[in-house]
Amino acid sequence: MRLCVLPMLLAAAGVAQAQMPLTPSTNSPATFNGFNDWLNAEARGVRIGADGQIRLAPGLRRVGQLSEGVVWAAVSDGAGGVFLSAGTDGKLFHYSGGSVKPLAQVKGGVIFAMAKLGNDLLVAPSGEGKLFRVSPSGEVKPFADIEAKMVWGISTQGGDVVVAGSGEKGAVLLLARENGGRRMAELPEETAFTAMTPDGAGGFYLGTHGRGLVLHYSGDKLETLMATGFEEVRAIALGEGQVFIGANNGLATRMASGNLEKRESYLSESGTTTKSAVIRLDKSRVPETLWQSNQGQVFSLATWRGQLLVGTGNRARIFAIPLSDHGRDQEAFASLQDLGTAQATAFVASGSDLLVVGSNPAEIHQLSDSQGAEGTLESRVLKGNPLADWGRAYVDSEQPTGTTVELQVRAGSTETPDSTWSPWTPPLRSGERPGVPPARFAQFRLKLSSTRGGATPAVDSVKLYWTNRNLAPAWEGIDVMPTGVVITRNGPPDDIGIERVPLETQKLIPALLYSGSEKRSFRRASQAFVFRVNDPNTDTLQYRIRVLPDRGNPIELEKAWKEKFFTFDTLPLPDGRYRLEVTASDAPTQPFNAVLTSTFRTSAFMVDHTPPTISDLTATPEGDGVRIRFSAQDATSVIKEAALSADGEAWLQILPEDRIFDSQTERFDVLVPKASVRGDRVLVRATDAHNNEQTAFAFIGAGGKK
């Protein structure tokens, strides 16, 4: 027997016979050959060029640690060491000779700015409106009162001290002296001056928070050079007659609160808006954006050995940008090193080397111009869907004599590598299978090394092959809709006609009206189902659908149904109990020899097209009314509803004698007021649980139904 699926469903579903293309993730290599491919990698001792090439980096080693989490300001001690302010309690430290020692604690808030004045240190705790002088022995004395509640920059010129920050009415630039001072410039439209760098000729370059302005102060004149389009300018550096500006969005509030974010994890995602940029003003003050990021923010700038170094967070990467146009033509920028902290907050010259200060945790690193001998890079975590087989890895590299490149792979079931992951494989040759177990996640590690000074290997690309392990569709269940509900893709068919929709179904259809683009309506003798099934690999599914009678052979309805809902006309089926069997297959998006299926059978549902019978119908005058008696019986289900019409117009719902519909046979005895009776006959109607109806009539005063 071939049953009829409603034609409207086939037309709406648009069932196609051709196979859909395979999903890209079925068998794909993870390819790393551009700079952005390494953004979420953990890099130590390797330099990543703008073209994505990996080489050994200048040497970097940690030389000091602080107990506080964040270093806010750093200034050279003039002898290869550095003074530091850290934490939120005004603590000062001195790094010298390879060790860090506490220097003093200044009452007040966070110290964001410091400067050397002779052998002493000038500091400005936030919110105090004062400058303090700290001696080399740690003695703290007031130096001057200032009209600034937050100080972001201090510069000394001879005996004069220039302070940049925020006052009661916006950004202020102050001249501070022990016997008094004066206001040099103010900018009420901006919140604060957040960056200050001497121009070498008695003036200053300034950056603001608010509109991110860059200004020049000289001879009591304040000139705006540009608006960066960012919220604030955090750092300014000079080199080869050019001005370099580090601008940010979203950093100033965290800085002012004394709370910086921790280091980004493996799970960090790229933002959708630009967070920071490095902008150059050339000698003619023409601006050009040299570098920008939607992940990191600029914390510090410094010129060093023909490069502009950019200290960023929250991965503490140090970027290098050539100062010259020719150098930038060769390579626009490079990721020079990664501190392993959250922020690279300051650069301080130390002889021919450079001290790099990190925060979260607070550390001091020494950057050398000489190349390191070893470096590693751990890739971002690769993710299968939901389980993957990890195949061969290919490394495209150059390895001059005395240099090597090693590749290792590991895999695990947690999104962040932990002790449950497999150990790193032994070093692999390019094209060698790693032999790690099937797992949802994997990662590779590159190790570059050199035994020849100045020689470095270069990695141009890594390609790791993998394929998702196909898993069978996973069933949650199949919802059997009430008899008569029709589910379509577009809308009710034109031939649905006018039918009496049962009351309980009227209540259900509005609640079930839409599920995605599905639409629901009513047609007698239809049976609808909703499939709750998902594929672990997000494959496209198709369904084989069969009806299983309690007795007899299965009846196939569809071989490759595409929708997650299904409706068919039950009229060709004999009355009885049935189940729907649905087999989900991922054939549309899997290779032929990898297709998997899973089957679900519904609970039993009844097909019942036989209406109840009505017997013993009488309509007898009694007093001021008419007594109506009858019985209703159904062979398959309980009687669920009855009604009578004594006037030929309106139906009156009635209850059986025992006042509850709970049996396949129900008796009715109703007295209808004579005023409600018109004509010489009454009509009665009985409905079973499957909405089959039977009607009968009797003449008043005559026995038996008609």
Image: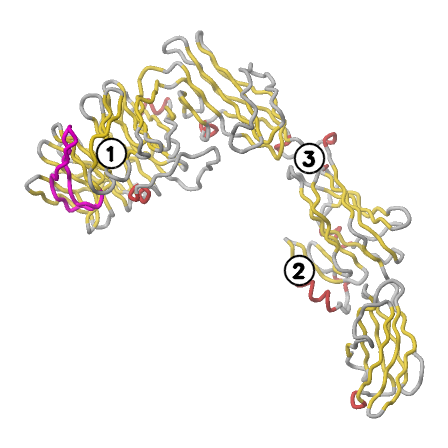
- The mark total stands at 3
Residue 63 vs 156, above or below: the answer is above
Residue occupied by mark 2: 513
Residue 58 vs 705, above or below: the answer is above
Which residue occupies 33% across, 22% down?
62
Q: Distance between the residues labelled 1 and 2?
A: 65 Å
Could you tell which of marks 1 and 2 lies nearer the N-terminus? 1
Q: Position of residue 53 (x, y in %)?
A: 44, 21
Foreground mark, 1 or 2, reads: 1
Q: Position of residue 160 (x, y in %)?
A: 10, 35
For the residues labelled 1 and 2, say whether their Cβ atoms are less than 8 Å apart.
no
Residue occupied by mark 1: 85
Q: Tell me the crowding category of disc 2: few under 14, some 14 to 19, or many 20 or more residues within 10 angstroms, Cα based.
A: some
Q: Tell me the crowding category of disc 3: few under 14, some 14 to 19, or many 20 or more residues within 10 angstroms, Cα based.
A: many
Comparing 1 with 654, the one in front is 654
Q: Distance between the residues labelled 3 and 1?
A: 56 Å
Q: In this view, does 324 lie to the left or right of 580?
A: left
Foreground mark, 3 or 1, reads: 1
Magenta span includes 131? yes
Residue occupied by mark 3: 471
What amino acid type is highlighted by mark number 1? Ser
Could you tell which of marks 2 and 3 lies nearer the N-terminus? 3
Magenta span includes 266? no
Stretch in magenta: 126-149
Residue 585 position by quadrant: top right
Could you tell which of marks 3 and 1 lies nearer the N-terminus? 1
Q: Where is residue 338 in the image (x, y as percent from the top left)?
A: 38, 26
What amino acid type is highlighted by mark number 3? Leu
For the residues labelled 2 and 3, say whether their Cβ atoms are less than 8 Å apart.
no
